[in-house]
Image (cartoon, rainbow, N blue to C red):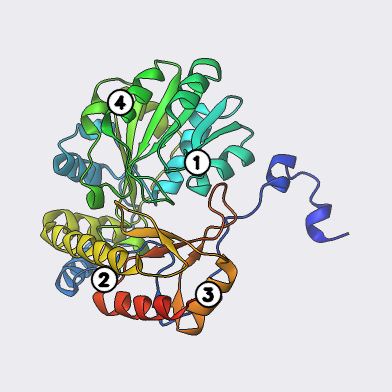
């Protein structure tokens, strides 16, 4: 019997839930985590470090990142009392499951961001998924039916969608959000909204049970500092904040994000380049004899290959790391590829187009 087997107090729901499916691998060109390929601008990094150095490190930071909530609220034109800040949006997903999922339902389209279902499984929520349509659009009729008969709970709408990169028609999103009525906490996950140009803040403002989930990990290029946030009605934020650990955002992260919010121009420049590069790579990859590349509105795209394992390993021999998605429903043979720098994208294209049979 292993040590783990002797830990009899561990809940069965935790035992049967797999760990987050990620294994770090070193490679010269890293296109596997949808990261911004550029680091925080050096001059802003210096400002952030100077600001953090001026603060007392022996004192706890703000209890609920109050100053940062004010800054984010000003940037997003949102009441700061309706802003929730945590170390990464995945933490907010866990909190949402605690808030409205335990003993109830977590509903989403499948496949989706794995953390939705992992947290539901570990916390004893009923996880329900409806498969995306073949063209990766939302299954509107099936989700509407689930909303009518499976609540209450948490309903996730990812726009644009991960891992497919698809962005749905705004009218479809609005109909589904409205169909949720008052029985659901409706989460519009907008982690990649800068790349798609979509913005559902007005839809969130229209009802007190809706929220927009956003992050500094993607377009802002601050994944290493871990900061996610949500915009919602202040009353909903009051309940959700009860579940947040005190002093959960550290002084260095707060200083860096404050500096980023004061100098946001770099984000627009990098998003514009990422969109140009994404479209360039997708257009070039359309010439591949055996791979199918799908349109994307994010900083990554999906390709379907005859054999994901063979294609993944072939790219790795060229020093290029991507993410396999072929274990997910409806994504047989698929790889997810992040948009890198122009040089990294050129290297990916050269390698991919040299792989003729896989």
Q: Nearer the viewer, mark 4 or mark 2?
A: 4
Residue 215's x, y, as percent?
32, 50
Name the residue tied to disc 3.
357
Disc 1 crowd, CA 10 A, few/some/many (<14, 14-19, 20+): some
**Mark pair 4, 2: CA separation:** 34 Å
Name the residue tied to disc 1.
94
Name the residue tied to disc 4.
174
Q: Of callouts 3 and 2, which one flags the residue occurring earlier in the amino acid sequence? A: 2
Residue 43 in the image: above or below residue 75: below
Name the residue tied to disc 2.
38
Q: Of callouts 4 and 1, which one flags the residue occurring earlier in the amino acid sequence? A: 1
Q: Nearer the viewer, mark 3 or mark 4?
A: 3
**Residue shown at 27% from the left, 32% from the top:** 170
Q: Of callouts 4 and 2, which one flags the residue occurring earlier in the amino acid sequence? A: 2
Q: Nearer the viewer, mark 3 or mark 2?
A: 3
**Mark pair 2, 1: CA separation:** 29 Å
């Amino acid at each position: 019997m292993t040590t783990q087997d002797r830990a009899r107090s561990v809940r069965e729901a935790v035992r049967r839930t797999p760990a987050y499916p990620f294994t770090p691998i070193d490679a010269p060109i890293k296109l596997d985590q949808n990261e911004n390929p550029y680091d925080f601008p050096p001059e802003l990094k210096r400002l952030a470090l100077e600001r953090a150095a001026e603060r007392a490190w022996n004192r706890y930071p703000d209890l609920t990142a109050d100053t940062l909530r004010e800054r984010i609220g000003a940037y997003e034109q949102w009441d700061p009392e309706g802003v929730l800040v945590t170390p990464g949006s995945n933490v907010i997903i866990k909190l949402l499951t605690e808030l409205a999922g335990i003993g109830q339902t977590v509903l989403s389209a499948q496949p989706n961001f794995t953390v939705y279902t992992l947290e539901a499984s570990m916390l004893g929520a009923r996880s329900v998924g409806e498969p995306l349509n073949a063209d990766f659009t939302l299954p509107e009729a099936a989700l509407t039916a689930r909303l009518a008969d499976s609540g209450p709970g948490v309903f996730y709408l990812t726009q644009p969608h991960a891992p497919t990169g698809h962005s749905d028609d705004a009218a479809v999103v609005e109909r589904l959000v409205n169909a949720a009525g008052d029985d659901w906490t409706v989460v519009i996950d907008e982690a990649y909204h800068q790349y798609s140009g979509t913005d559902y803040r007005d839809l969130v403002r229209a009802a007190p049970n809706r929220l927009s989930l956003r992050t500094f990990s993607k377009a802002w290029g601050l994944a290493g500092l871990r900061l996610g946030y949500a915009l919602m009605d202040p009353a909903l934020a009051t309940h959700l904040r009860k579940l947040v650990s005190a002093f959960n955002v550290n002084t260095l992260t707060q200083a860096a994000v404050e500096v980023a919010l004061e100098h946001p121009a770099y984000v627009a420049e990098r998003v514009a380049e990422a969109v140009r590069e994404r479209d360039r790579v997708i257009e070039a990859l359309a010439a591949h004899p055996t791979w199918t590349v799908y349109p994307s509105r994010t900083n990554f795209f999906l390709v379907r290959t005859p054999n994901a394992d063979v294609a993944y390993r072939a790219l790795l021999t060229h020093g290029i790391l991507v993410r396999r998605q072929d274990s997910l429903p409806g994504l047989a043979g698929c790889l997810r590829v992040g948009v890198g720098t122009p040089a990294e994208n050129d290297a990916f294209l050269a390698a991919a187009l040299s792989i003729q049979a896989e």
